[in-house]
Each structure stands twice: as structure tokens, then as C-alpha cells.
Amino acid sequence: MILAEWSWTPQGGIPGLGFVHGLAVVPHYDEIRRLAWQARLDIVAPPGLGYLGLDERTGVISGDGGWQVAGEGAAYWFAPGSSAPVVGRDGEWLALPA
């Protein structure tokens, strides 16, 4: 999550290392908290970022086909300005910023 441009923590948002441009990572994602963090991120995050929500024990791995989801849960990609995610589960590929 620190490789992204921005990340969400329990204390609020923090800048990442910026190796992956165009996205903010939201770890420990779940449907109960989705609306609360998204509203806050829209206020405090840099403009133009998409949000990648990752369930517990779930991550994404960069590869030739985009980003492959790995783990028990799902990855939720909210493209910039989108209120509905593209959802990927273990073994599926998501088209995220590189």
C-alpha cells in the first residue's frame, strides 16, 4: 500500500512513495466502512486518484495482464470519479494504473 501515491490509515490519509501513480490504497476494506472512508478521502486526498479497496488477507500483484488479485477476499477498484467499483477476486485481473 505504501507503493501507491496515497494510502488510508486509521489516523487518516498519508502520502505513499508514489511508485504506482493514480491510486490510493484503502486496506482492511469492507462494505460497512465504504461510504465513510470514501467521503473522507474525497475531501483530503489529492484530486484525480482512483481508490483500491483491499479486503483482509488480499492484495494485488502487477503483471503483464494488469494487476492480479491474490488472497481470500476481493479487491475493489473505484476509478477516479466513479461511485461503483470493479470487483476482482483471487486469480482475476484488474486494469489499474501502472
Image (tube, rainbow, N blue to C red):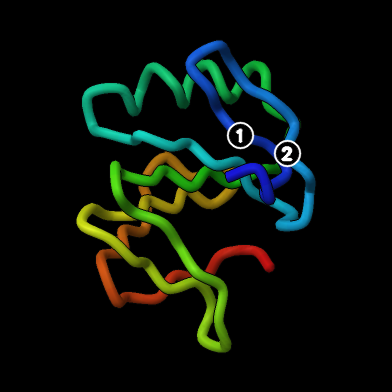
Tell me which amino acid carries mark 2: Gly
Disc tally is 2
At a point 74% along the width and 54% down the height, the residue shown is 21
Left or right of residue 7, residue 83 in this image: left
Give the number of the disc on residue 64.
Answer: none
The location of residue 30, given as percent across then percent down, is 26, 33
At a point 42% along the width and 40% down the height, the residue shown is 83
Label 1: state its secondary structure: strand
Q: Quadrant of residue 47?
A: top right
Name which of mark 2 and mark 1 comes first in the sequence.
1
Above or below residue 86? Residue 24 is: above
The local crowd at label 2, few if under 14, some if 14 to 19, many if 20 or more residues have their Cα within 10 Å, is: some
At a point 68% along the width and 37% down the height, the residue shown is 6
Q: Quadrant of residue 19?
A: bottom right
Quarter of the image for the N terminus: give it: top right
Most foreground residue, 12 or 32: 12
The location of residue 62, given as percent across then percent down, is 56, 73
Left or right of residue 17, residue 49 in this image: left
Question: Please, which residue is most extreme toward the bottom here?
Answer: 64
Quarter of the image for the C terminus: give it: bottom right
Q: Are marks 2 and 1 in contact (CB under 8 Å)?
A: yes
Name the residue tied to disc 2.
16
Tell me which amino acid carries mark 1: Ser
Above or below residue 23? Residue 7 is: above
Left or right of residue 77, residue 96 in this image: right
The location of residue 5, given as percent across then percent down, is 73, 44
Question: Please, which residue is most extreme toward the right here?
Answer: 18
Name the residue tied to disc 1.
7
Label 2: state its secondary structure: loop
The location of residue 23, given as percent across then percent down, is 63, 48
Most foreground residue, 44 or 14: 14
The local crowd at label 1, few if under 14, some if 14 to 19, many if 20 or more residues have their Cα within 10 Å, is: many
